[in-house]
Amino acid sequence: MIDIFASALRLATPLIFAAMGGFLCERSGVATICLEAVLLTSAWTAASVTYFSHSPFLGTAAALWVGAMTMSIHSFLVTKTKADPIVSGVAVNLLALGVTPILTKLLFGSPTNTAALPLSERMSSELLLGLSFLLPFLLHFMVYKTGWGLRLLAAGDGPQALETSGVSPAKVRYGAMALGGAVVSLGGVYLSVAHASQFTREMAAGRGFIALAALIFGKWRPIPAFLTCLFFGLTDALQIHFQSSPLLGTTFPVQALQILPYLITLFVLVGFIGRAKPPLAIGKS
Amino acid sequence: MHDPIQNKITFSKITKTFGAVVANQEVSFSIVKGSIHGVVGENGAGKSTIMKILYGMFPPDSGEILFDERSITLSTPHDAIQLGIGMVHQHFMLVPTLTVWENIILGQEPTLGRLNKAAIVKSLEAIKTLYGFHVDLNARVESLSVGHQQQVEILKLLYRDASILILDEPTAVLTPQEVDSLFDKLRTLKKAGKTIVVVTHKLKEILKFTDFVTVMRQGQTIETLPTSTLTESSLAEKIIGRKRIPLNRPQVLRAHSPILSVESVSLTCSNSTLLKNLQFQVFPGEIVGLAGVEGHGQQELVEILARARKDYTGKVTLQGKDIKESSTYELKQQGFSLIPPDRYREAMVPTFSLSENVILGHHREENIKSGAFLSKEKMTQFARELIQAFDVRPGNPDQEMGSLSGGNQQKWVVARETAREVSFLLAAHPTRGVDIGAIDFIHQHLLKLKSQGAGILLISSELDELLELSDRILVIFQGEMVAEVEKEKASETQLGLWMTRGHQKEKCP
């Protein structure tokens, strides 16, 4: 039983980082479906930089920077060139999906994975786990209690009002999205150098989308989104447990648990569990 | 006015073009500090442009703005705010999901550290008391009435310590009572030494509340003069540049049988009553005005009469025939016409040409067909005739309708709806967002239809319009008909009260 909960926490951690980063991005008024891309580029960067520098902290710092930059491609396309945020998000996702194996092949010879790190060069899981539990509360304070947060919310819900108050919504968005990208990157770091010891191709495995689902289910609020991530982590842990459980054996359809996060999100979007209202500027160009 | 430049904001030969369109051409006038200054003109006269230049939203192509004697450069709203200039836009610039106090401090708040809500609220309360505002600082803006949202906008400027307040069409969405209360507040602000610039096209307000008026026409300033020297007709003439044609209301004897009869129509939608037992008739040769604050059931009534919804109880008959039993096409054959409330969305296809738009709903008629097909030639010919009759500009039948000005679009809608014989016309906000020239034209046209024996139901939020055109005025409040008065006995004040507070039912005839 305790095993299942421990495993749930481990599985939830990257989701929490991704959802919290997504929270900052979406709240600034830009639809952000490219959390997956940021997880991939940051996971790759963390594994590679740590491998060559032998310092997981340097690897993490580099991953944060690359994650912020990956997200900034998206915010640049949307804010400056007025690209459709969904099209831009898909493009950035595909870019990350393609670029990471190419770089892996160039540096490590095989496109499937980077070289494994020794245990001593891995990042502490507990540290990241602890951080992921603090972050939602920190973001709640930053966004709902400070002047910076007020501007962020205004950029998402009333950019014109913000502009006529003498503040550029574009600048607010660039800042929030870069910060959001860095936060998502912590999830990537967790995946490749804390939870595992190397980057493997497509290792984000849809977590960026599940995090987005958690964000929607949490109605774009950090603490409910955080709790949803924990719940999704639990369903994932149960699914893994049942796969190998002699009790239920092969008769239990684990797919039923695997689809749970997506199913729940669908229910929310259809409006069964209270309507989820996105930031008003999302969906408008 | 005697002291040339002292204590004034002076525009000197400001020119601003957008592509080929000249929005402002050598605009020059002065605003005396500490006064209420009106800027009037038709739509597209350049009033809003010159105000946006003053607020730093558009830099002018040439010319300068003088503050006292100092030339100033304004390139962003931030510059204007620094100089104490604030603007309330026609469409409010508020974040609906944030609270009132959050909206007010937005852009002025320290970005680092926790916001000190208690201190902010305290300073805002002081401003509120000083100028007599009543609005709950902790309410979410989306829950406020339009009048209160406007108060928030003005508080925003006062919190920024603005000494010059620009208000762009501030009364467009207000009831008569809210208008009075707004101008009371503006007078208080004037006493406190603020300068107030009001952009509007409503002549009455200008005459009643301002000290000076600047008249603009086609991007140019025509004249600036003290309000006391003006009358409503002299001001209107200056605005349109010619004499107004006086309205001549023909008297038509009431026929015995109504053209339209609404019998105990009620409409409920998920437990809320939208319309409650509506009962009225419109006779041939009569204009019946329907007064009411927007959102009190007018939209639903239009939808019912236009056969867009049928989930009501009760009965509506046109010439004695239940409209539920006829198709829209058959109604049109009976002479039913409709000027919808939302021109852009409901009355036209912006990307269609004028000639295509004018046959919408009439495409089965023989005069535009050759054999089974539409004839482009005949359509164009038909459109040409109407363009001439209704003086629509520019008058090219192939031009996209969306590229015309609001006034010309509306004339075109009226042209389509009244080109055939009309027995009943439902005119919902027929002059909304339309300039004075076109308003006069549309009013004349409605009266012409009346003299030809059409029955007209006129829905409008402009009391002036209702009082000028109607034979009878009905007042709707929360979906209920709360009053009915003959035109002669109606007063603006009384109508305004009924519109906002309802009326004892037993007094209605």
Image (cartoon, coloured by chain):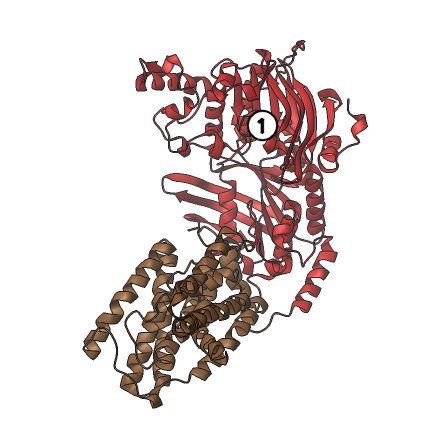
Chain colours: A brown, B red
Horizontal placement of A109 versus B277: left or right? left
Q: Residues within 10 Å of mark 1 (few under 14, many from 20)?
A: some
Front one among B177 and B66: B177
Horizontal placement of A149 versus B285: left or right? left
Q: Which residue is mark 1?
A: B304
The chain that hosts pointer 1 is: B
Q: Amino acid at mark 1?
A: Ile
Task: Tell me residue B259's x, y (percent).
Answer: 61, 14
Task: Tell me residue B501's x, y (percent).
Answer: 75, 37
Front one among A161 and B80: A161
Give the residue at the far bottom of this rendering.
Answer: A120
Front one among A197 and B257: A197
Task: Tell me residue B285's x, y (percent).
Answer: 62, 13
Q: Is residue B73 above or below residue A194?
A: above
Which residue is at a point 54% across and 35% down the rendered structure image? B41
Residue B395 seen in the figure: no
